[in-house]
Image (cartoon, rainbow, N blue to C red):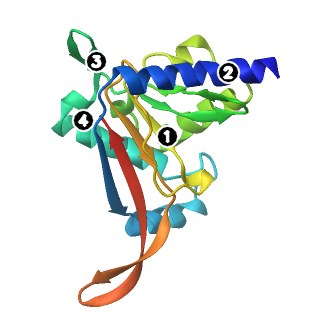
Amino acid sequence: KVRFVDWRKVIADRMTASAREVPQGKTLVEVDVTDLADLISSVKDRVENPKITYLPFLMKAIQAGVEVTPEVNAYCYEDGFVLQQELNIGVAVEVGEKLVVPVVKRVKEKSILQLAEETQALARRAREEKLKPDDVQGGTITVTNLGPFDVYAAMPLLLPPQATIVALGIVRDQPSISGGSIEMRKKVMVTGVF
């Protein structure tokens, strides 16, 4: 029980400091992922490992966003911003009473399959408590995937000194108007906090 209280206190202290000390703007965007869902479904039978999910595609979408707005891939200090050359995405992983954020390094250099494989390997090592110090250092943007918890949308708090965190909600079927008719489309809420 003491360990449980200690970890929750560490998390609470960090999140309280983030909310109190860092001004945070938030955006919420609904994204149509119907075509992506079809693609993922079509490769499930052909690709056993790694399991293809939405997460590596989100990482590549973040990469595209960083190319347009490099300021989101920065560290924020009291005296200013420091743009980061590498895109290293931390992926929040719940491990019992802890929340750990292993980091996928050099995202720009990796394919969707490589990102999927590395993300799953890091999450597995996190759950087995086999992460090395280097596995949790150097993140420039954090991603939290709330889909497995059936969460539609959330407003996460920044992990200082990072200037961006992105939350991915659950993918849901939503009625949409297309070409004058109503059809079911797969949609997901993506939250950006900056």
Which of labels 2 and 1 is toward the front? 2
Residue located beneath label 2 in the image: 7
Task: Look at label 3 and name its amino acid.
Answer: Cys
Q: What type is the residue that disc 4 sits on?
A: Val
Looking at the picture, does residue 29 appear above or below residue 143?
A: below
Mark 2 → mark 3, Cα distance in angstroms: 25 Å
Residue 56 lies, in percent from the top left, at: 45, 45
Position in image of residue 44 (x %, y %): 58, 61
Confirm or deny contact between disc 1 and disc 3 (CB under 8 A).
no
Residue 144, numbered circle: 1
- What crowding class fits label 4: few (fewer than 14 Cα within 10 Å), some (14-19), or many (20 or more)? some
In this rendering, does residue 28 appear at all?
A: yes
Q: Residue furthest front?
A: 20
Marks 2 and 3: CB-CB under 8 Å?
Answer: no
Q: Is residue 50 above or below residue 141?
A: below
Contact (CB < 8 A) between labels 4 and 1?
no
Secondary structure of the residue carrying tag 3 is strand
Mark 1: which secondary structure? strand
Q: Earlier in the sequence, mark 4 or mark 1?
A: 4
Name the side, left or right, on which 87 lies relative to 8: left
Q: Earlier in the sequence, mark 2 or mark 1?
A: 2
Q: In the rendering, at what x and y percent does residue 68 appear?
A: 17, 39
Dot placed on the residue nearer the N-terminal end, 2 or 3 = 2
* Cα gap from disc 4 to disc 2, whole angstroms: 32 Å
Q: Which residue is mark 4?
A: 66
Nearer to us of marks 2 and 3 is 2
What residue is disc 3 on?
A: 76
Residue extending farthest to the left is 68
Residue under the image location 31 percent in, 26 percent down? 163
Residue at mark 1 to residue at mark 3: CA–CA distance:
20 Å
- Observer-side mark, 4 or 2, equals 2
